[in-house]
Structures are given as C-alpha cells and as structure tokens.
Image: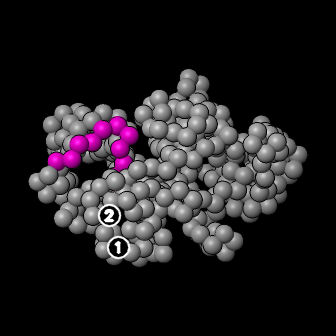
C-alpha cells in the first residue's frame, strides 16, 4: 500500500536551547533548554520513529537497514539526510563541518553540508556566516590571537531567509533564531569558538577543535550562488532553494485549492509542515497534515495531491547523497 510515512521526532537538550519547540510547534520537549528536534532522522544519535502503517514502531534507521525497497533500493550504508528544527535561545558555537573525504578518514561518517530555512528571527538577529581571512596562515593567526570580531563575519537574517552552508563554511546560528535545517546525516561538528562559555552541566568550557577547523575551513570564504527557481504546481507555489549533489530543498506553499505532484528522479521525498494545515492525498486516501508534522513519501508513492493552507519544506536526496 502506498502511503506517507509519518515520523515522531527525537529531541536534544542543548546549553543554548530554549522552549520555542513547545510554544511554536506544541511538541512535548524534555526541558526549557531543548535546542534540537531531529524530525526526520536515521542517525544513531537520535533516530525518529515511524508512527503509522506497516513499519509503525520501528526507527527510521531500522527501516533503512531492513526494508530498503521503501527507498527505491537506494545505495548507501546510512540514510543520507537529516531534517532538524533548531531553537537558538543563545548563540550556538562557531563551527566548521568536514567534507565527505575528511569525515570518512577521521570520523568514519558522512561529511556535513547543510542549509537553513529561517522560521523565526528576533529583531536584529544575526548569523555567523563566513570569515574575513584571506589565507590559511592568516586564519590560524587570528584564531591564535583571539581576534574573533575581526575574523568572523555576521549577517542579518529574517524569517523566510534561506542560507546554504556547504562543508568548510565557518558558521553559527545566532541567538533568537529558529531554523529548519536540512543536512547530510552526520553529527560531526568542529567547534572553533564557544564565546568562553561554561557548560553548567560540567562546570567546564566545552572542548574546541582548532586544528580540525583550520584543516577544513573554506579559505577564503565565498558565498555560494543558489540560482533559486520559482514555479506553480496547480495552486501550490514552489520555490527550489537549492539543488546540489547532496540534496534538493523546496518550499511548497498553498493558500487554498490543490496541487498534484508527480515523482521525479528522486526515489523518496521528505516533508515538514512549518505552518497551517491541510491534507495530502495518496492513492485515493487523504491524510491530515498540520503544523509540526514530518513525513516521508516512499518510493511507491508516485503521485500526491496537497490541499489546504500550508507551508511545507520538502527535500530529496541528491545524486551523490
């Protein structure tokens, strides 16, 4: 039977987290320091659980391992994508992620290219995005001297903005920002600067990864060209934010009416409802959708129709996912 696979997220407490995942999405969070909702995840550090259908009760990594036909018999040892919602009550650490080659050699997992759709941003909110060093020697020297204000580049953001963060990008989500993050399924983070904070749970500063950050950073920094596309599918306004070898990310926005999608090249599709409510119809059956729900459209779902008033961020694996 072709049907959407709905998922129950896994939540991560973080020193920089808050309670917006409860107040904004109605999730039952473990504390008022909850930073991350791992919404569509097969990563061992936080797998999501299937809530319906044939595989109800299994974690997504179990379905990937034992029922690969669900994903069109896609290759790969691990499910390649990870969808999160992040609530940054305070700044995250400034960090760098490795590419596939470096991560495979040193961490034995995928590299980490990611992107952010900004859900909420307090007035004056800023992202750390890129740096001002021209050479690796200058980059290392500025870190050594603690010249963070000189080194780090900050950009203002607002709700609705989209930022692509390829591996090697120096970055941090700033305080007062909530994002939906689409990324490679990796939990490897090299922390370059943590504002000299003390972790209340340990009474110590968190570990830094200076040499790995210097090794992996994109130097000099350059902003990627996204070439966004806008088009209609029936009454659904579609924005393609980015399409790379790792993933493609879209916004589906419907304000009444309906729109029917046909499966393209990708063997499966991920979706997260960020606002509103409506329905998705698959093989003649309608399933309710509302804000905060997350789902996968498996390989055997060849067509689906959206109804209602909703905003969905969707993604698909790229050719080299």
Q: Main secondary structure of the magenta part?
A: strand
Residue tagged by mark 1? 67
Q: Does the stretch in magenta take in 289?
A: yes
Measured from the top left, where is residue 142 in percent x and y?
A: 83, 48
**Residue at position x 53%, y 47% in the image:** 11
The percent coordinates of residue 159 (x first, y second) are: 46, 32
Q: Nearer the viewer, residue 321 or 130?
A: 321
The image position of residue 223, as x and y in percent, is 57, 49
Side (left or right) of 34 relative to 297: right
The region drawn magenta spans 286-296
Residue name at image x 34 percent, y 73 percent: 67
Q: Nearer the viewer, mark 1 or mark 2?
A: 2
Q: Is residue 16 above or below residue 95?
A: above
Which quarter of the rendered picture does the N terminus lie within? bottom left
**First in residue order: circle 1 vs circle 2:** 2
* Residue drawn 43% across the image and 62% down it: 59
Look at the image and tell me in which quarter the C terminus lies: bottom left
């Amino acid at each position: 039977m072709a049907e959407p696979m709905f998922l129950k997220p896994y939540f991560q407490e973080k020193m920089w987290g808050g309670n917006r995942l409860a107040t904004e999405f109605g999730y039952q969070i473990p504390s008022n320091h909850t930073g991350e909702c791992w919404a569509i995840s097969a990563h061992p550090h936080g797998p999501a659980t299937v809530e319906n259908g044939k595989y109800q009760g299994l974690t997504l990594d179990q379905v990937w391992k034992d029922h690969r036909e669900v994903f069109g018999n896609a290759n790969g040892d691990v499910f390649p994508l990870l969808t999160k919602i992040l609530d940054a009550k305070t700044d995250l650490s400034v960090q760098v992620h490795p590419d596939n080659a470096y991560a495979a050699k040193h961490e034995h997992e995928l590299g980490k290219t990611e992107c952010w759709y900004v859900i909420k941003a307090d007035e004056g909110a800023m992202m750390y995005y890129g740096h001002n060093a021209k050479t690796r020697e200058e980059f290392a020297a500025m870190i050594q001297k603690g010249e963070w204000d000189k080194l780090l580049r900050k950009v203002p953001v607002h709700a609705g903005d989209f930022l692509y963060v390829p591996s090697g990008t120096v970055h941090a989500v700033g305080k007062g920002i909530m994002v939906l993050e689409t990324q490679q399924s990796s939990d490897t983070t090299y922390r370059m600067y943590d504002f000299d904070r003390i972790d209340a749970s340990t009474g110590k500063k968190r570990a830094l990864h200076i040499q790995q950050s210097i090794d992996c950073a994109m130097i000099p920094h350059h902003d990627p060209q996204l070439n966004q596309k806008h088009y209609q599918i029936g009454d659904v306004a579609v924005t393609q934010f980015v399409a790379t070898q790792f993933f493609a990310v879209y916004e589906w926005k419907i304000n009444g009416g309906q729109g029917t999608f046909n499966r393209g090249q990708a063997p499966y599709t991920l979706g997260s409802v960020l606002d509103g409510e409506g329905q998705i119809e698959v093989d003649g059956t309608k399933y309710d959708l509302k804000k905060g729900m997350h789902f996968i459209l498996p390989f055997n779902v060849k067509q689906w129709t959206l109804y209602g008033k909703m905003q969905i961020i969707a993604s698909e694996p790229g050719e080299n996912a």
